[in-house]
Image (cartoon, rainbow, N blue to C red):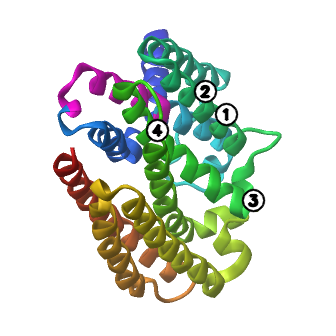
Amino acid sequence: MNSRGNKLFLFKNFLAYLRVKDWLHVLGLTLLGTAFNSFFSIFSYKAFSALAVSALYLAHGFSLNNYFDADIDKRINKQYLPPGGKKLLFFSYSLFIVNCFISYRICAPVFYLVLAGSLLASLYSAPPFRMKKSAFPNIILNSAGFAIIFLIGFAAVRGRITRASAMTAALFALLFIPLQIVHQIAHAEADRAENILTLYNRYGYAKTLAILKASLSLLVLWSLLIGALYRDYIAVFYLTLPLSLAIFYFLKKLRGAGNALQKSATELRDILKKICLLYGTALILAFRAAG
C-alpha cells in the first residue's frame, strides 16, 4: 500500500472508531435538555453548539473505549477494525481538547460537564481502573455518562444547572440501567471471554432480570417524585409509567439460553431503541406544554 493509501486507510479507521451509528440517536438527550429549559431553545444557536459538544463528547468516549478494546475486538468481533496504534489514542484526546475549547466558550457548567464525562470514560475504559470489567461500576459509569448529555443541552442554553434539571438527568441515568443490562446480555459471550463481569455474567439470568425490573420500578418512582415536586412536569411521570410498562411487556422476548438468549436480547435492544425514541419525542412535546 502506497503512502496515499496508508493515509486514506488511517483516516477511514479514525472515522470508524468514532462509531457514529452507535450513538447518533443519543444526541436526542441534548435536544431534551434544551427543550427542558424551553421548547423554542431547540432552534437557537446555543442548541446547535450543545449538539456539537455532545457529538464530540460521545465520539471521544466511544473512540477511547475502542482503543482499549482493540485487542478484544481482534480476537472476538467479526467487525474488528485494525487499530492505528497510539495515533488513535491521540485522535481521541484531540477530540476532547477541541471539545474543551468549544464548551468553555459556551459556559463554565458545560465545560465542567465535558471534563466530568472524560473522567468517567477514562475510569470505564482505560487501565489501571478499567471499571467496565466490574458489574455495578460498569452500569453506573455508563448511565451517568449518558445522563450528562442531557445536562449539556440544558446548561448550554440556561448557563447553569438547576435542581430540576439534575433530577431529570438522574431519571435518564435510571432509564439507561435496564437498557445497558439488555445490551450486556446481547454481548455476554464476548464479555465472558475477556472476563468482563457484567451483571449477567456475574449473577446469571434470574438475578439480572430481577435487578432490571427493580431499576424500572425505581425509574417510575423517581418520575413520580419529579412530578410531585414540579407540577409543571407531571407529564414526565405520565409518560415514564407507560414506557416502563412497555419495557416490562417486551421483556418476555428474552428467552432461551446461550446464543439464543443473546439473539433475543439483540432483538429486544432494537425494540427498546424505538420505544425510547418515541418516549423522547413525547417528552419534548410535554416540555413545550410545560414551558
Q: Position of residue 38 (x, y in %)?
A: 24, 37
Q: Residue at x 55, y 68 (%)?
A: 181
Q: Residue 256, percent across and down?
A: 50, 89
Magenta: main secondary structure? helix
Q: Is 182 included in the stretch rendered in magenta?
A: no
* Mark 1: secondary structure: helix
Q: Alpha carbon of mark 4 to alpha carbon of mark 3: how far?
A: 32 Å
- The image quarter containing residue 246 is bottom left
Q: Quadrant of residue 156?
A: top left
Residue identified by numbered label 4: 162
Residue range highlighted in magenta:
41-58
Q: Nearer the viewer, residue 37 or 10?
A: 37
In this rendering, would 116 be left or right of 158?
A: right
Q: In the rendered structure, which disc, 1 or 4, sits on the residue that comes first in sequence? A: 1
Could you say which is closer to the camera, residue 4 or residue 107?
A: 107
- Name the residue tied to disc 1: 119
**Mark before the other along the chain sequence, 4 or 2:** 2
Residue underneath mark 2: 115
Q: Are marks 1 and 4 in contact (CB under 8 Å)?
A: no
The image quadrant where one finds the C terminus is top left
